[in-house]
Amino acid sequence: QVQLVDSGGGSVQAGGSLRLSCAASGLTLSSYCMGWFRQAPGKGREGVATIRGDGGTVYADSAKGRFTISRDNAKNTLYLQMNSLKPEDTANYYCAARPQLGIYCPPNPIAYNYWGQGTQVTVSS
């Protein structure tokens, strides 16, 4: 049974940093597309970053240059390092997984089978 457990959210001031973690069980990260998504109040869920089984990464424009997605295969844990946070980054952040079926990890959240419970990130100005 696949389980994803998100953690690491919190409240920070603009310009601050947070590192989110997603502890995975029941799957092998290197065989899955893994992604971070977020949902702000009143908005739809959007992609932040994805990482392929071979380690290739893709970022949303809003995350480029500020966020870094990574994983530790030995710990079966996915990370999102977030620097230079802005108030518009305020959202509930979720990790997600889907089997790696090709070389492409889709950015659309509806393509992902498994989800963490989410962790809240609040950035104040």
Image (cartoon, helix red, strand yellow):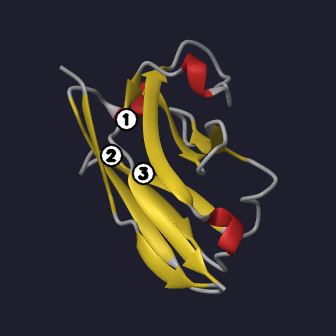
Measured in 3D between alpha carbons, the distance from the residue under mark 3 to the one under mark 2, in whole angstroms, is 6 Å
Say what amino acid the circle numbered 1 marks: Leu
Picture residue at 64% right of the left edge, 64% below the top: 89
Image quarter of residue 10: bottom left
The number of callouts visible is 3
Q: Residues within 10 Å of mark 2 (few under 14, many from 20)?
A: few
Residue 8 relative to residue 16: left or right: left
Say what amino acid the circle numbered 3 marks: Arg
Of all residues shown, which one is farthest toward the top? Answer: 101
The answer to the question of whether label 3 and label 2 lie on touching residues, with beta carbons closer than 8 A, is yes
Q: Nearer the viewer, residue 31 or 78?
A: 78
Can you identify the residue that label 3 sits on? 71
Picture residue at 69% right of the left edge, 75% below the top: 86
Can you identify the residue that label 2 sits on? 73
Picture residue at 45% right of the left edge, 34% below the top: 96
Going from the N terminus, do you reach mark 2 or mark 1 first?
1
The answer to the question of whether label 3 and label 1 lie on touching residues, with beta carbons closer than 8 A, is yes
Image quarter of residue 42: top right
Q: Quadrant of the C terminus?
A: bottom right
Of all residues shown, which one is farthest toward the right? Answer: 61
Can you identify the residue that label 1 sits on? 29
Going from the N terminus, do you reach mark 3 or mark 1 first?
1
Residue 54 relative to residue 7: left or right: right
Q: Position of residue 79 (x, y in %)?
A: 43, 57
Say what amino acid the circle numbered 2 marks: Asn
